[in-house]
Amino acid sequence: MPIEVVPFVAAHLDAAAKLLAVRHRIDRDRMPELPAEFGEPTTARAAIESLYGAADTDGWTALWDGQLAGFLIGKRQVFGEASIEALFLDTKAVSIPFTGYAARADAAETIYRTLYAAAADRWVAAGFLSHSISTTIDHAGGEPWFSLGFGRRFGHGIRALNASENRPEPPLPPTFSIRRAGPAARDAVFNVFAEGVRFHTVTPIFLPYLAEAVESHRAKIEGWLADPAVATWVAESAGEVVGMVQMHPAEGHVDDGIRPANSVYLFEGHVNPGARGRGIGSALVERGLAWAREAGYAVCVVDWFTANPLSSSFWPRRGFVPFAAQLARRIDPRVSQSNG
């Protein structure tokens, strides 16, 4: 009997939660860094219900012999050209979060292909040509999506912050110092952020530099510098800020399913070119993690563009274990013309 795809409705929640809990336990067998609690149907159900109830979501269910065999939920996102999100995402994009899909293990790839075909048909018809999905970073997690044309865009790494994982802060070169920044450092921190965006515009990353979007981040930086829950550490030399790391509570930044309890998110980190190769980045990271440990956090999560050769080697060297990824696919915009 062929797989039937129907819209996701509330009546599917319990069966979908059981599928997600099973998938999560299988994923966690391969990637033990994943938080354990999503292997429980109750937690899985709450995560799916949160997605299903959110605005601008599309949900699809695969029925096989009348039984729920899989589901997929994506969130449609629209960003202005002057928004900071436009630097990293297309202005019309669909994201499928880590808890937004599951399928019977014995036929997962077939079910995912069928679900995605139905969902993508609706998204592309509505002009959403950029699609992303969060998976484990290994071959088993990515292969069903690689076969659909997705490629890896972001990697996620995780590092425990207990005492046994503590690393001494590397010594700083003469004339350099590190301090926690306050609101008065807004422009200096913004300049480092803007330099980080410029770094990502070159080969092989090719991030666009959108001046209005970059400038829109200045006000956010000012707010974060005044927020006691956010810690921004800067490295200075001769009164000039040459690098920074910024630590945020992980909730709101890291997907359900890959966000451990009591975790902090290393949101931004950059060292200007002239200060690289002297241990400044490593010292900034260790200072930020020491603060997070003292604040009671147990785990730190970071992500990076996998096309960035510096980040792809730096974060694992600092003890971050790669465990999850965001995969992305962009549909050729000429498809709307050819379909007429």
Image (cartoon, rainbow, N blue to C red):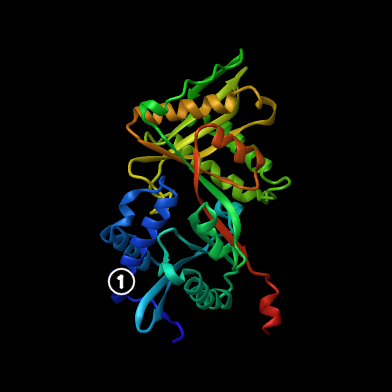
Report x, y in % for residue 135: 49, 56
* Furthest-bottom residue in this view: 1
Q: Is residue 171 above or below residue 148?
A: above
* Furthest-right residue in this view: 203
Q: Say what secondary structure mark 1 lies in.
A: helix
Give 308 or 21, whichever is nearer the viewer: 21
Q: Name the amino acid, label 1.
A: Ala
Q: Is residue 93 visible?
A: no
Quadrant of the rendering where the C terminus is positioned: bottom right
To which quarter of the image does residue 224 belong? top left
To which quarter of the image does residue 197 belong? top right
* Furthest-front residue in this view: 106
* Furthest-left residue in this view: 42
- Reading the image, the residue beneath label 1 is 15
Residue 334 appears left or right of 137: right
Report x, y in % for residue 69: 39, 74
Q: Residue at x 37, y 84 (%)?
A: 65
Q: Residue at x 42, y 34 (%)?
A: 226
Report x, y in % for residue 336: 66, 78
